[in-house]
Structures are given as C-alpha cells and as structure tokens.
Amino acid sequence: MFSRSVVIYGLIILAVIPLINRNKIKAAFSLRETKSAVESFPYLLELQETKEKVDVGKINQLIDYYQGVVAYFPERADGYSILGFCYFHEGNINEAIENFIKSIEINSDVIWFYYNLGQIYFHLGEYQKALQWFNQGIRTKPQRTLDFIASSKEIYWPIIGNNGNFMKLKPRLLRGYKETYQWAVMSLVKLNQYSEILSLSDRAIKLNFDDDGFFSFWASWAFYQDNQYDQSKKFLRVSLNKSHVLANLDYNEDFKQKALHGLFKENSAYAKELYKVFSLEKADVKLKLF
C-alpha cells in the first residue's frame, strides 16, 4: 500500500515539474526580454504606416525578441505573424513567408496573415499564388480577426498601445477587406481571367465598399476583353461617375465622354490614362499587422 502511494505521488510530481519549469521559463523570458524590446514596439506601427527607411538596429532587436516569443510560445500565431512582418522588413522574404504560413497553420481565421502573403507574392510577380492567398483572406470572418487581436494581450496589445488605436481596429479591418478584394482583382487582371474578374468585382460591389469606382472600372475592362461592349460602357460610366480620384485630378467631362466613346480600344490614350488611375501596380508592397 505504501509503495503504491509513493509511486502515485512520484508520478504527480513528475507531471507537475515540467509545468512549473515551463512557467518559470516563460516568466523569465517575459521579464528579461520585454524590457529590451519595449522601446521598439512603437516602431512596428511606424513600419506599418510609413515608408521610412528601415532602422536595422531596431528591426534586428525585434527579430531577436519575437524569435524568443515563438520559441517559448510555439502555439501563438500572433508571435509568428509579427516575426514574419519583421523578417519582411529586414529583407528576408523566405523567412517572412514561412512565418506567415506557420501563423495560418495555427489560426486560419485572421485576414492579415493571408493579405500579407498575397502582397508578397503579388510583388514577386507570382500572381496565381497571390490570388490564392487573397481569395482565402476574403473568406475569413471579420469578427474572428477582431477577437484574435483583442485576445492577444501579451503580444499585440503592447504594439497597439492605447484605446485610441483599439477604436480604429474595426474601420481598418473593413478597409483591409476592401483592399484584399482589390488586390485579388488585380491578380486576376494580371492572369487575364476575365470571367473571374467580373464575378469578384460583382461580389465586391454588392458588399457596398467605398470603392471609388475601382471595381466598376475593372468589370468594364473585363467586359470589353470579352467583346461585351454595351456592358463595358455601362460599368465604365458608373466608374467615371463614382471616382473621387478623377474629380481630384480634374479630369473634365470631355475626357470622360471621350473615354466612354473609345472604351479600351488599342492605343486609346484615355484608356491608358484610366488604367494608370485604377491600377495598383505602382503601389508599394505594404504589410499589415492589424
């Protein structure tokens, strides 16, 4: 009886010790590393919002920190995602891709993981892969992304920093869905997949995004490529009427009428000009944390 009790007690001790050690390791890591990285947390926001030249010292400090995060918290998708974000800005594209994919393997509900992979592949010229990730991104549920960020007290909260930034999460997220649709359409444009452009543009239009004529323009372009000229003119007219960009650039009514008349005919100066306005080709690759 005595020996049996000793064995059971010993098994309990053996089961508990790893938990104690793990918690001690996590606590030690948190106390040691948070101090050294906390000054650089706001820099992640700067990288997301601006086009400033990368500060090598800060980005390397952050990479060291988030490497520690994923080493001690291998179940945390947020850790891998931010590490991928840092690797991208360091210029290590392969490591960035690997970490974003790891994030998705752990949590497949967050649009930003897919958006970032799509952005990387689009700017690498791998449009089919970009389309794959953008399409998966738009199938996620917005609330699940918000819940994920809200639950990330240890990892996302120090970056977000204050209630004002938290209040901006939902409108930023809705813009993110619109932009993911836009990049998916641009991937289809690159792949000359006209029927898919029409289908995706129609879905985006029905979602009532403040699209500024983007989706109507590319629907018009796809209809033209499919020799459906009446439909092309119809959607181009909608696009020209909706676009604040054209208004701000002072395209007059004469320009719009000639664009409608010429549509997308070869060597049409109006079509080329509109293509520049509505294309995202010159947009810089820009990853997002939230």
Image (spheres, helix red, strand yellow):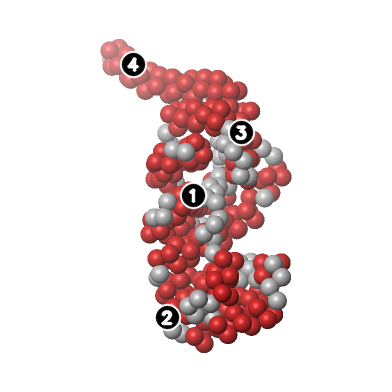
On the image, numbered disc 4 is attached to which residue? 10
Give, as a three-letter code, the residue at label 1.
Asn
Disc number placed over residue 116 in the picture, else none: 1
> On the image, which quarter does residue 216 sit in?
bottom right
Give, as a three-letter code, the residue at label 3.
Phe
Please name which of the two marks, 2 or 3, marks the residue nearer to the observer.
2
Q: CA distance from mark 3 to mark 4?
A: 44 Å
Disc number placed over residue 226 in the picture, else none: 2
> On the image, which quarter does residue 4 sit in?
top left
Residue at far bottom of view: 230
Mark 4 surroundings: few (<14), some (14-19) or many (≥20) residues within 10 A: few
On the image, numbered disc 3 is attached to which residue? 41
Residue at far top of view: 2
> On the image, which quarter does residue 58 sit in?
top right
Question: At 39% from the left edge and 41% from the top edge, which residue is drawn?
Answer: 94
In the image, residue 152 sits, relative to residue 190, either above or below, namely above
Any part of residue 174 in sight: yes
